[in-house]
Image (cartoon, helix red, strand yellow):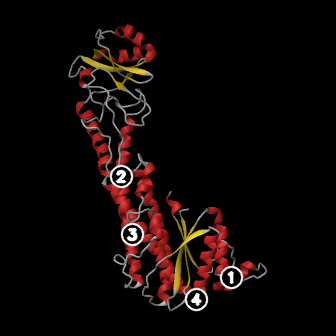
Amino acid sequence: MSEFWLISAPGDKENLQALERMNHVTSKSNLSHNTKFAIPDFKVGTLDSLVGLSDELGKLDTFAESLIKRTAQSVVEVMEDSKGKVHENLLANGVDLTSFVTHFEWDMAKYPAKQPLVSVVDTLAKQLAQIETDLKSRTAAYSVLKANLENLEKKSTGNLFTRTLSDIVSKEDFVLDSEYLITLLVIVPKSSYVQWQRTYESLSDMVVPRSTKLIAEDSEAGLFTVTLFRKVTEDFKVKAKENKFIVREFYYDEKEIKREREEMNRLLSDKKQQYQTSCVALKKGSATYRDHKVKVTPLGNPARPAAGQTDRDREGEGEGPLLRWLKVNFSEAFIAWIHIKALRVFVESVLRYGLPVNFQAVLLQPQKKSATKRLREVLNSVFRHLDEVAAASILDASVEIPGLQLSNQDYFPYVYFHIDLSLLD
């Protein structure tokens, strides 16, 4: 299980013996794997300051947990093409999260224990606040990039009736810069190809003979060109529609088409090279992108490039700066979170067990979900002497304490904090 219980008990002889009993019972019954959790000796300060820190650390704990969840979710979104490898990238100080927690050591260089506790907590709070600020700005930029790319990609999806045609047609398909002639694009159902070839010249006067050409098709229809005199354009559209041939409104603007293709190239390049491990792949000979459901095949000149296609194959692996930043700062936030847990154990232990500071922290890893209730009962039984009144209220239902309602699930006679790594799954 990726769940941990971080507890503490006084460090006197009686409670050290209780810890030994706990280890014996939990090990014998295979309830949990237990290890000592080392926490430095901090400068305690006043009890009043500890009470304030207790509340502040509780809020900081919640904030840190939320931050690492959001950072982990951003990693998932950025690695959209490699979701199976996400957990390989969610590490803490280069090791998996479970190993980091079970082998935790206080980072004296980053969070000096000789400093007042208030200063240590302030350092952690500022570090996490900065990570959150940067996370918001970086993920917002990525979202804008992704949205722009998706908007362009949507234009390249769908059938010939709705998708952009700029990545299908070429300059050679049109009669351009003519005062009298115009080239139209007509969508013809596949079942009507023969009818089109037989009738298009007679749909209107002044249609240029043998001017039609099939330049692209999808699963349902084909895209044909036809050249005619400008003055019969409207009449041709009406007659074509009567025969279930649809004229697509399209004006060939070489500069606009070039701009659109360059924009797609730029966005694809940014998303791959600047942000994520892999990118939408462009295949030679296809005018659509990977995962698109409708494929439109350009016909005619086989050397004509598909939209966005470059001389280099755009498939590949490469870790971009956003993913690198997310990995580094997920690690930093997670490490800070476990340090906050350690601080909470220290502060609550001093508040509960008093001065001088003398307690032992233990990390328990429940072996299976079904055993957690039994494990809780064992701990409550072993440490019931730490809070006899509360223990009696549970063991003897006839005892009522005004304002105190406890159950085995929320009764902790010892200091207890929960670490649930499954929340990152």
Separation of residues labelled 4 and 1 (CA atoms): 23 Å
- Give whichever of discs 2 and 3 has the lower sequence position: 3
Callout 1–callout 2 Cβ contact below 8 Å = no
Where on the picture, by quarter, is residue 332? bottom left
* Residue 390 tag number: 1
Of 139 and 171, which appears nearest the observer? 139
**What SS does tag 2 mark?**
helix
Separation of residues labelled 4 and 2 (CA atoms): 57 Å
Q: Quadrant of the N terminus?
A: bottom right
The residue to which callout 4 is attached is 13
Tag 2: residue type? Answer: Tyr
Choose mark 1 or mark 2, whichever is in front. Answer: 1
**315 lies above or below 275:** above
On the image, the x and y values in percent for residue 222 come to: 39, 20
Callout 3–callout 4 Cβ contact below 8 Å = no
Of 4 and 166, which appears nearest the observer? 4
Separation of residues labelled 1 and 2 (CA atoms): 52 Å
Tag 4: residue type? Answer: Lys
Left or right: residue 290 versus residue 6 is left
- Give whichever of discs 3 and 4 has the lower sequence position: 4
Callout 4–callout 2 Cβ contact below 8 Å = no
Callout 2–callout 3 Cβ contact below 8 Å = no
Left or right: residue 392 versus residue 143 is right
Choose mark 3 or mark 4, whichever is in front. Answer: 4
| Residue drawn at x 43%, y 17% as measured from the top left | 190
Choose mark 1 or mark 3, whichever is in front. Answer: 1
The residue to which callout 2 is attached is 142
Separation of residues labelled 1 and 3 (CA atoms): 38 Å
Tag 1: residue type? Answer: Ala
